[in-house]
Image (cartoon, rainbow, N blue to C red):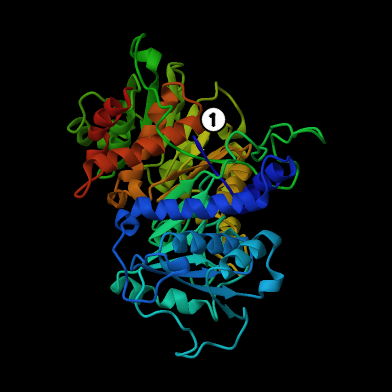
Amino acid sequence: MTELLTAAQMRAIETAAIESGEVTGLELMERAGAGVVEAIFEEWPEMADDRGPAPEPPGYLGQVETGLRAVVLCGPGNNGGDGFVVARLLRERGWQVEVFLYGDAEKLPPDARTNYARWCEMGEVTARAINPPPLKDDSLSISENFDLLVDGLFGTGLGRPFGGLFSVFAELRGLLRERGVRVVGIDVPTGLCSDSGKGLGAVISADLTVSFHASKLGHVLGDGGEFCGRIIVKSIGLEGGARPVGRGEKRPPRGGRVGRCPAVSPGDVVQLVDGAEISLSKEVGHKFSHGHALILSGGAGKTGAARLAARGALRVGAGVVTLGVPHEAQAEVAAQITAVMMREMDDAGALATTLGDKRLNALCLGPGMGFERARELVPVVLGGGVQTHPRRSVVLDADALSAYADAPETLFEMLHERCVLTPHAGEFKRLFPEIATKLEAVPTKGPAYSKVDATREAAARAGCVVLFKGPDTVIADQNGRCSVNAAVYERSAPWLATAGSGDVLAGFITGLLARGFAPMQAAETGAWLHVECARTFGPGLIAEDLPERLPDVLRNLGA
């Protein structure tokens, strides 16, 4: 899977590479600026075309102008230094470029100062103070007609709300779109927290964001998908070199060549879930060798959610799937199922008897169960905190979570490492109210508390895997391992916002657990397949369609 980095991790990687002598900071800045220009021309090839001379005075060194104009906004740090490189490279291509510096040129970091000087040999810089009074309507001089706005203000370095002087750019975004001006963010759109995807005040919404070495967490979390436009990641020559030390990894000895980052608190590595390693083939064995999943339903008129979960578990490859159904709902369920089996299960005693079948290796409780039934049956499955039978893999969803909203610690005491909790935002808040409060807080400085932070903390408290649903689904286990299943950008799947889709996801995870997947792997794989099923169907999707798309998704994977 692909790594997603925090701002601290990226700084640590760059610092380790520089200190090892592999590269200089100036070289990294030059590569970053070149990567931005390359990405612009890849995204909009027409901008790379020579439009012929413009009706303006000859450009730098008598160069033929293309007729294209850019405005480059440079901030007081190294993100601004990247902006100066972009300005210079565009100017060398014949663009007319207007450059604004927000800050004091004398206080720029050394590498950014060097690139400021290089640009000054080619063109002018309009300097603006960082903290002036509110702007007047005529205080910002930007060419009326231009094609490209490059945001090199703060990037990953922003640590406080973005507003005042700078909010004018965010407010101009609608007007720029009307004029056909393309906006490019360097690394992260200014105003967006690169670790959480939260807006730190106003945000300069980009059409294209060009990042370096690896995507950042803020690109896929929170509002990142709304403000980043399209993400292109460009190499700056750090592959195979320094990287952040993940949980459980050893740090390198002092001295010598740096292959991994020293202890600079870069945090733990987060992975972006993808389908590259998914294998669900069935080459040998019989039905019970691929697992037996038990999914408990609610009463009459409330069995649909469990039936959706059962269908998902069966489609994902569980050898046998049984629905545990109250007596009064049996006729209703029997009329709706064929390959899924059914067993009468009215109360705790009946469930305990059923659990005597050692072939049952994965259970799902919650979809459509009702709070009262959940409070009665969840302790039986989890042993009530006292283990009386072999631990089975368990998915707790929906009512099995909300039933403990008034006493979450009671649930946490029963959980074990083979459990997977799958809350949406409301259920998460009911189970982890203090964590949710931190997540919902409006950030006043960065890095903001993120969904990754919240999910990791929740998993540690629950002692098991937590899958926190949303377009930015975050999955973490009790040891801090974490991944993001991002349904944003080209993987956007808005059609999943339909009743019952979460029940199918619970079924996918349960079926994978039955097949022997570890809880973290089952949650990651189930979430990825869930999005892919929605994407292959498209508009008009309802929950019943999701399991039926799974064969096509698996066939495309070669699984």
Quarter of the figure with residue 22 = top right
Rendered-image quadrant of the C terminus = top left
Quarter of the figure with residue 343 = top left
Q: Amino acid at mark 1?
A: Arg
Query: Circle 1: is it few (<14), some (14-19), or many (20+) Cα within 10 Å?
Result: some
Position of residue 237 relative to residue 226, above or below, is above
Quarter of the figure with residue 286 = top left
Q: Is residue 160 left or right of residue 470?
A: right
Q: Which residue is mark 1?
A: 418
Q: Quick one: 469 or 393, which is closer to the camera?
A: 469
Residue name at image x 51 percent, y 47 percent: 215
Kindly give the residue lying farthest to the front in the view shown.
62
Q: Is residue 488 left or right of residue 251?
A: left
Q: Is residue 160 left or right of residue 273?
A: right
Kindly give the residue lying farthest to the right in the view shown.
254
Residue 278 seen by the camera: yes
Residue 409, image x, y percentages: 61, 47
Residue 504 seen by the camera: no
Position of residue 391 relative to residue 205, above or below, is above
